[in-house]
């Protein structure tokens, strides 16, 4: 990352090599602390972007700013590189609540932690996202059993008991006398408690054009509402036996412009997507923006919405890596260390 960052400084040189230039003085990074308001602003912009664009699972909250580096960019602006630790909240991405208003899961509820490397451009006081690369992992089972021996841990999303529990809960919900018939969109997470076995599941649903009552006879004819009316919901359920099911769902009002088309595309084929086979959570690594090292496999249509035409800067930096005529990068001697990592907002995982 250091090399690419240093090469960004060379970009203006490369693009106008014919023009005589003043002797090249590499500009030094500017040192700011992880808890500096400017770092927090950059982190908040990156987090908003992640929450608005990652296509599966839950919204995340900022836990710790691990690292920050601010590099000058010629002819103007600065590049911010940050490493962020995030924590999964209880809000699924279909929940319209802003992530700031979403509760972070307590440690005993088998938390999922996200790690992101983000790069932003600050130009004339405003930030835009250049690239984001994340992954997420559930806390270790050993950690959970240490702080809470009886807490159920996350189960595989394709576990047979989990899938059965979701089917039962959804049928139960669709048996209510009024309201719309909903279809399963994705299973968000599941936990199985033993003796007696209680399967707790969380899942996102999408609203169809049928009432729950109509659907009892011809569920196959029920189609999703058109995108300009699209409605989503989220359910929590606990299933003990097929006669002992507790399920509650929140159906959200239509959000103009929100289609979750990738979520629908990946999940409504009938089969459980390969994305979750053998996994206990929806990994943030499936979300990828502004690829520097190109593994285009996971770059999605939803993730390619760029607020600024800033990406070419990064692409040129990649070309520069390949250009043998470029002299070795003048890596800055690095001034004093910033105060990092920053404060822990929730808890250390
Ligand atoms: C989110 O939280 C803020 C601050 O607590 C509050 O003012 C706002 O009304 C909340 N928004 C929603 C949609 O609940
Ligand atoms: C739902 O939409 C489908 C396809 O447009 C249509 O065939 C069906 O009759 C609709 N059902 C209701 C209850 O409107
Ligand atoms: C369902 O199971 C719970 C927990 O064991 C129990 O308290 C409750 O009475 C059961 N309800 C029914 C309807 O069997
Ligand atoms: C879940 O997926 C994994 C990985 O594909 C597979 O090995 C496992 O057998 C699946 N479990 C069930 C119950 O289908």
Image (cartoon, helix red, strand yellow):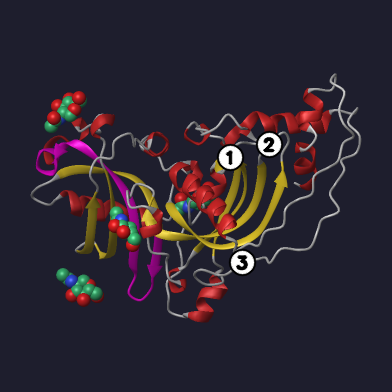
Give the residue at mark 2: 76
For disc 2, the neighbor class at 10 Å (few under 14, some 14 to 19, many from 20) is few
Whether residues under marks 1 and 2 lie with C-beta atoms below 8 angstroms apart, the answer is yes
Give the residue at mark 1: 124
Q: Could you say where residue 200 lies in the image, as x and y percent from the top left?
A: 34, 64
| Among the two numbered marks 1 and 2 on one chain, the one whose residue lies closer to the N terminus | 2
Q: Quadrant of the C terminus?
A: bottom right
Does residue 265 appear to the left or right of 84 in the view shown?
left
Camera-nearest residue between 307 and 134: 307
In this view of the protein, can residue 340 be seen by the observer? yes
Give the residue at mark 3: 342
Tag 1, which secondary structure?
loop
Whether residues under marks 3 and 2 lie with C-beta atoms below 8 angstroms apart, the answer is no
Q: Name the front one of labels 1 and 3.
A: 1
Residue 286, above or below 135: above
* Span of residues in magenta: 190-215
Camera-nearest residue between 243 and 113: 113
Task: Estimate the spatial distance between the alpha carbons at disc 1 and disc 3, rounded to whole Å.
Answer: 26 Å
Q: Which mark is residue 89?
A: none
Q: Could you say where residue 4 lies in the image, as x and y percent from the top left?
A: 76, 41
Asked if residue 202 lies in the magenta stretch, the reply is yes
Residue at (77%, 24%) from the top-left corner? 15
For disc 1, the neighbor class at 10 Å (few under 14, some 14 to 19, many from 20) is few
């Amino acid at each position: 990352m250091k090399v690419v960052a240093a090469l960004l400084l060379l970009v203006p040189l490369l693009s106008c090599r014919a023009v005589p230039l003043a002797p090249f003085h590499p500009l030094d990074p500017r040192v700011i602390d992880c808890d500096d308001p400017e770092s927090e602003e950059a982190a908040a912009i990156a987090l908003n972007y992640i929450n608005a664009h990652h296509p599966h699972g839950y919204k995340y909250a900022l836990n710790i700013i691990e690292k920050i580096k601010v590099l000058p960019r010629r002819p103007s602006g600065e590049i911010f590189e940050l490493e962020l630790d995030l924590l999964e909240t209880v809000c699924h991405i279909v929940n319209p609540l802003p992530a700031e208003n979403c509760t972070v899961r307590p440690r005993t509820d088998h938390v999922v932690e996200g790690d992101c490397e983000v790069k932003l451009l600050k130009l004339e006081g405003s930030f835009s996202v250049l690239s984001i690369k994340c992954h997420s992992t559930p806390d270790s089972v050993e950690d959970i059993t240490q702080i809470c021996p009886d807490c159920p841990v996350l189960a595989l999303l394709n576990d047979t008991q989990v899938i059965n529990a979701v089917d039962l809960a959804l049928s139960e919900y669709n048996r209510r006398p009024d309201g719309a018939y909903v279809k399963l969109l994705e299973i968000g997470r599941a936990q199985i408690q033993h003796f007696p076995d209680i399967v707790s599941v969380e899942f996102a649903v999408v609203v169809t054009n049928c009432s729950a009552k109509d659907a009892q006879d011809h569920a196959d004819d029920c189609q999703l509402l058109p995108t300009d009316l699209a409605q989503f919901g989220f359910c929590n359920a606990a299933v003990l036996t097929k006669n002992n099911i507790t399920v509650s769902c929140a159906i959200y009002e239509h959000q103009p412009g929100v289609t979750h088309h990738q979520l629908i595309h990946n999940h409504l084929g009938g089969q459980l997507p390969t994305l979750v086979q053998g996994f206990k959570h929806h990994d943030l690594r499936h979300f990828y923006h502004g690829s520097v090292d190109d593994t285009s496999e996971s770059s999605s249509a939803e993730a390619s919405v760029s607020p600024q035409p800033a990406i070419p800067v990064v692409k040129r930096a990649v070309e520069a890596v390949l250009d043998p005529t470029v002299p070795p990068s003048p890596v800055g001697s690095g001034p004093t260390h910033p105060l990092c990592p920053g404060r822990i907002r929730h808890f250390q995982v």
